[in-house]
Image (cartoon, grey):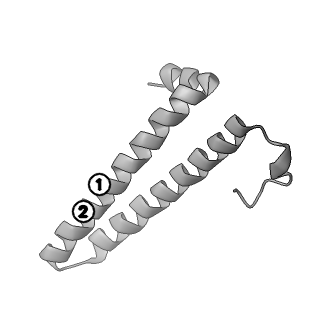
Amino acid sequence: MSATYHDWEKLDELSRDLERARTSLSEEFDAIDWYQQRIAASKDPDLKHILKHNRDEEKEHAAMLLEWIRKHDPEQDKAFKEHD
């Protein structure tokens, strides 16, 4: 649950799931950024290869979450389509 929401118990199940998905998406983007910074800083090619693999898996996770959000939030899906 997001630390910023004040009354979790009043949310319906879809709102809770959307919050979970959006929080997870934010965490995936944070992980992508951390891996990217480590890739840029590392001089070891073998380590860079592993970090790139890990970063790319986080990108896949983010894409999966975005697709789930699009399926469950028609207004968000519309916004994505308008800005493709």
Q: Where is residue 72 in the image (x, y as percent from the top left)?
A: 58, 29
Residue type of the residue flagged with mark 1: Asp
* Secondary element type, mark 2: helix
Is residue 75 positioned above or below 63 on the image? above
Q: Mark 2 points at which residue?
A: 52
Q: Where is residue 3 in the image (x, y as percent from the top left)?
A: 74, 61
Q: Residues within 10 Å of mark 1 (few under 14, many from 20)?
A: some
- In the rendered view, does 37 fall on the left or right side of 2? left
Q: Could you tell me which residue is drawn at 21 percent across and 69 percent down? A: 50
Residue type of the residue flagged with mark 2: Lys
Q: Could you tell me which residue is drawn at 47 percent across and 42 percent down? A: 65
Q: Mark 1 points at which residue?
A: 56
The reply to whether callout 2 and callout 1 are in contact (CB within 8 Å) is: yes
Q: Could you tell me which residue is drawn at 25 percent across and 78 percent down? A: 42
Disc ID at residue 19: none
**For the N terminus, which image quadrant?**
bottom right
